[in-house]
Image (spheres, rainbow, N blue to C red):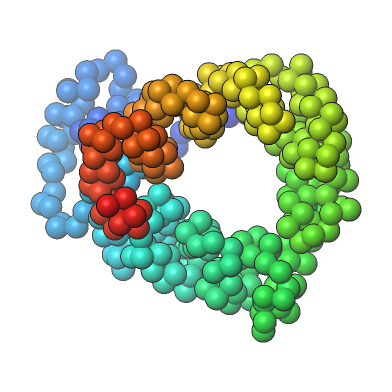
Amino acid sequence: MPGKFYMVRDFRHDHGFTLPNPARALNLGTPDACLGCHQDDSSEAIVQRFRDWYPDPPASGRPRYDESLQLIRNGLPGASRALLMQLEDGELPAIRRATLLAELPSYPSERTLNLALRDLGHADPLVRRAAVEAVSALLPQARRLAPLGPLLDDPVRGVRLAAAEALMALPDATLGPQQASHASALAEYEQSLRAQADRAEANLGLARLYQARGRAALVEPALRAALQRDPDYLPAVVALAQWLEEHARDGEAHRLLDAALARHPQAALLHHAKGLALVRQGRREAGIAALAEAARLAPEEVRFGYAHAVARHDGGDLAGAIEQLERLLERQPGNREVRLALIDYCRESGQLQKVQVLQAELERMNPDDPVLRQLQ
């Protein structure tokens, strides 16, 4: 059996794998047990032997999950239709339904929102939790209470906590009859984080909760507790720097980031945070350079390249911003935020033919996208 290293040093042989299909794996670019084990044989020979043993079954008439997921995750034509058809299948296993619900925010429309709202009442808590996260991404904070409020009393703790997190920034005055459930769920959410207070991640979660609830005096101590637990937990470094900057302590914020960068010069997240701080401070040229370094160090993180492109645009480099967004979109054709920014910048530069092409591609991916009506 093939093996993998766990925890860097522990080599273990696999004793199970998903149903193999080498021809389909080659077509979709996914792992396959047959291809992974018989690496000394040609893929063509493996495919042929597999077909000799297992001829292709007759087509069921249903779209295949794996093929649909490839369309959805790569932003290919027909992606939203494939997503809707899968989610409308009443026999879809819960793990697959939850996986697809996580893709809904990339394809906003009234239909996708309605599917997410429907699955808030699904029998499986894995699906309900995924639906909470999808609805949170599709709706602004002010519109979440009506659909998510009832899940503050869900019988499953994980679903209650997901609903509490999604609603934690709502002011008490807006909660109406949900106020008691909201307070109870938030208390449970806080207790769950406190139970993990030996972890930096939990202390960062507490800081975010305190900030959302207006408990400002507790935010900085929670962030510093996170860094006491793990001085190299970079999300807490960035969060503390932003908190200091928001409270007119810019010098402390920059010293904190500079010290972290001295220890982690290859950390793209730190260069990104430093660049944004410099831009906000009015040091645009230095900020753009730091954002460029973040994008260079982590080209797979599209948000870093996107922030760099926006900064270049705002600094007057429209052509450079367009070029960068085009590279990002080539890497992730389904990234809606990048595509919409590129449409705006191309229109600004007078490249109307490019605008039409980009809009047509978006329409082929998701013809129900509400932004298409605004762009007409």
Q: Nearer the viewer, residue 81 or 282?
A: 282
- Identify the residue at horizontal 47%, vertical 74% (top origin): 121
Q: Determine whether 107 is above or below 38 in the image.
A: below
Percent position (x, y) of residue 261? 73, 20
Q: Nearer the viewer, residue 186 or 311?
A: 311
Q: Residue furthest bottom?
A: 177
Q: Is residue 79 visible?
A: no
Q: Determine whether 274 is above or below 100 in the image.
A: above
Image quarter of residue 160 = bottom right
Which quadrant does the N terminus fall into?
Answer: top left
244 vs 148, left or right, is right
Q: Determine whether 346 is above or below 161 in the image.
A: above
143 vs 16, left or right, is right
133 vs 250, left or right, is left
236 vs 21, left or right, is right
Percent position (x, y) of residue 259? 80, 21
Percent position (x, y) of residue 327? 38, 25
Q: Determine whether 18 is above or below 316 in the image.
A: below
